[in-house]
Image: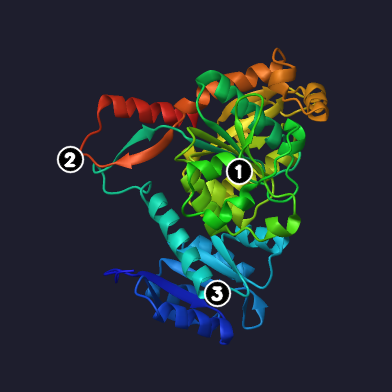
Amino acid sequence: MAATTNPTRVVFIGDPGPVQQQITTAMGSQAEFQLVEVLSTPDRLIRELHAAEPSVILIDHQLAGQPTLDIIDDISLQYPGAAVITILPANDPVIIQQATLAGARAFLIQPFTQVNLLSTLRRVNELEARRGKALPTAEGSRIEELKPLRSVAIFSPRGGAGCTTIALNLAISLYEDTGARILLMEGKFFFGHLDVMLNIRGRNTIADLLPHASALDEALVRDVVCDHASGIKVLLAPSDLQVGQGIRPDDIYSVFVNLQRYFDYIVIDVGSYLTENTVTLMDTADKILLVTTPDLASLHDTSRFIQLSRSLGYPPEKLMILLNRAGMLGGVRTKDIESALHHQVFAHIPDDQANAVRSLNRGIPLLVRYPRSSASKAIKQLSKRLPSAGALEPVLTKSGAVASKSQQEALLASSQLG
């Protein structure tokens, strides 16, 4: 790789030892990244970070013999301009979720190689560069326009909110509305249910794409995805938990980016558990359909995720609140939900639990088995609205002054949807 005139500034925080030596050696072997500081004591940490002005902060799981979760939290709040990558001793979902909630953008699992380190740095750097386009610049020098929505991640911070049901029926409805090439992607690499709920048995899974992540071809993709009777394509997660555990975020990112060449829309069932792969999929998706239900526990978790999304750098318009089981007996009113979340509800799916369970048990999508149900009709309305809720993208005018009327209208429409 050619030398970089402005290398990415990196700071490492951790105890002296093999990990520090490995990072120092890796940083010294290329010109793309520059290790500007190594900090091994918690004293005056924030002040030293401000002085170093890093773009990326690598932080070990321990510093001076103590866990670094609180330090990650402080850095994310006080130094939001840098992406935090934490180094973990094991691929433990609980620890990963704790680090994500503290504000980590990515993870390295020990033992890691120099290739793992540099690929993670590059992926985070690329995502941060894309996100930086949405940051405000000098007044009068920035406008925004809508780019077509091509991918949406369905996520809920609370299990049982109905992400998989919504994802698969939304994908089918998009296909019925547009006739476009639709991919339903399973983003839960542990205990996914798409094969059960769609009654399909695929020989291949996303694991078969990973060895070719950076160079997918159409024939390989066609062999790996499953055809569903509804007309959509389905990319399943591996049934082997050990295989799922070995999936790395940089490979997921490469696969997702390459899949966009072959599909018009990608709907991702992300599920309800925060992992680095989950965050990577939400990073790359144009929109996040944040599913909640009208009960206090679900709303509490949704509110926490909205707060977390700020530390992840998501603009407010990237999140779209979907209220599932709306109107359920004893549920919180929509007006109170919007007031509590400080976010407008984008769409409502009426409570239709009985039909949803029957559809699951029969392996027939709700939209196919009960097309006239209130929930099916609401999902159809959602699929009609969704393509117009494109992703906002900054565009600089030649004069750097005023946006056109059509661009202003597009921005206004997006703000109403978001």
Q: Position of residue 122 (x, y in %)?
A: 44, 63
8 vs 15, nearest the viewer: 8
- Mark toward the start of the polypeptide (2 vs 3): 3
Res 335 → quadrant: top right
Q: Is residue 13 above or below residue 248?
A: below
For the point 69% across and 36% down, which residue is it? 164
Amino acid carrying mark 3 in the image: Thr
Residue 224 marker: 1
As drawn, which residue projects farthest toward the top? 372
Amino acid carrying mark 1 in the image: Val
Mark 1 or 3: in front is 1
**Residue highlighted by disc 3:** 113
Q: Position of residue 3 (x, y in %)?
A: 29, 71
Estimate the spatial distance between the alpha carbons at disc 2 and disc 1, rounded to whole Å: 45 Å
What is the crowding at mark 1: few (fewer than 14 residues within 10 Å), some, or many (at least 20)? Answer: many
In the displayed structure, does residue 178 sit left or right of residue 32? right
- Mark toward the start of the polypeptide (2 vs 1): 1
For the point 74% across and 49% down, which residue is it? 239
For the point 56% across and 57% down, which residue is it? 211
